[in-house]
Amino acid sequence: MANDIIIWHNPRCSKSREALKLLEEEGIEPKVYKYLDEHPTKEQIEEVLKMLGAKPRDIMRTKENIYKELGLKDVDDDEKLIEAMAEHPRLIERPIVIKDGKAVLGRPPQKVLELVKGA
């Protein structure tokens, strides 16, 4: 069970590191997607939102300075929010784990185990 599981990972985030560790303890070696380095496209973000069954603001880090600087609190257009996340991936909450067309936001990190174990 190797690369059929992907984690959108930020190595500097303790929750992201914890989720990755939980997966590894289960013998799962996910494909690590360092989204801050690789900048997801609008289409990738839209796909993840579909898999999560979420709206853009559901996966946004609203306490980031860039969120305030861009005035995103007052934006009602989902397309504009997705564009902001594509341009500034720091706005994306992490970790996000993807498996078999489904995704989960690993907050708390234990939620990733529900997805990978099918619980």
Image (cartoon, rainbow, N blue to C red):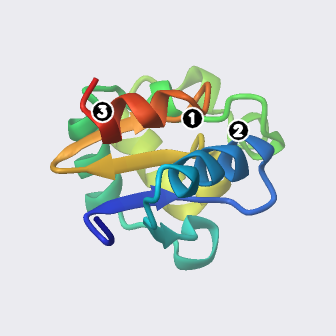
Mark 2 surroundings within 10 Å by alpha-carbon count, few (fewer than 14), some (14 through 19), many (20 or more): some
What residue lies at 23% left-to-right and 39% top-to-bottom? 51
The residue beneath circle 1 is: 60
- Closest to the observer, 44 or 74: 44
3 in relation to 44, above or below? below
**Mark toward the viewer: 3 or 2:** 3
Q: CA distance from mark 1 to mark 2?
A: 9 Å
Query: Which circle marks residue 52 in the picture?
Result: 3
Residue 68 picture location, percent across and down: 77, 34
Q: CA distance from mark 3 to mark 1?
A: 13 Å
The residue beneath circle 2 is: 67
Q: Secondary structure at mark 3?
A: helix
Residue 45 picture location, percent across and down: 35, 52
Quadrant where the N terminus is found in the figure? bottom left
Choose the circle earlier in sequence order: 3 or 1. 3
Residue 6 picture location, percent across and down: 38, 61
**Mark toward the viewer: 3 or 1:** 3
Q: Amino acid at mark 1?
A: Met
